[in-house]
Amino acid sequence: MVEINVIDEPLTLGADLEKTITVYENAIGHYAARARRIIGSGDGTIRAIENLVTTAGIQKGFKVLRDRGQMDSTFEALVIRHCDQFSSTAVEAARWRLDNAYNLT
């Protein structure tokens, strides 16, 4: 089971999302244009993140961050931290992925 660090002063979803993408960009060494385009902004952001965490395939970013031991910087961890803003289906999928992260390829 992966432990998600709880921040003393919780970030807004927008600030946490920016931090999450920035950590991924630092991991890959360049601007994450595709991730930023998929997530976008506004009303579609929640839906886009939910799609990422509920699809059958595991995203490259999840694998990169898992392999670097940065599971608390995945979109799945973001969903858990802001579970009140996501559907129960997305929260359950995020928890499952985090709990099974090292069994997924």
Image (cartoon, rainbow, N blue to C red):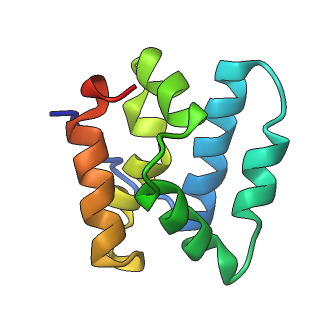
Indicate the position of residue 1 as horizontal and vertical percent values.
15, 33
Query: Observer-nearest residue: 88 or 23?
Result: 88
Q: Is residue 70 visible?
A: yes
Query: Observer-nearest residue: 92 or 17?
Result: 92
Check the picture and name the quadrant holding the C terminus. Answer: top left
Q: Is residue 103 above or below residue 76?
A: above
Q: Residue furthest front?
A: 56
Which residue is at 80% across, 46% downward? 34
Q: Is residue 89 above or below residue 72?
A: below
Indicate the position of residue 98 as horizontal and vertical percent values.
28, 40
Classify residue 8 as left or right of residue 34: left
Which residue is at 72% across, 79% downward? 42
* Quarter holding residue 16: bottom right
Classify residue 2 as left or right of residue 93: left
* Quarter holding residue 88: bottom left
Classify residue 78 as left or right of residue 13: left
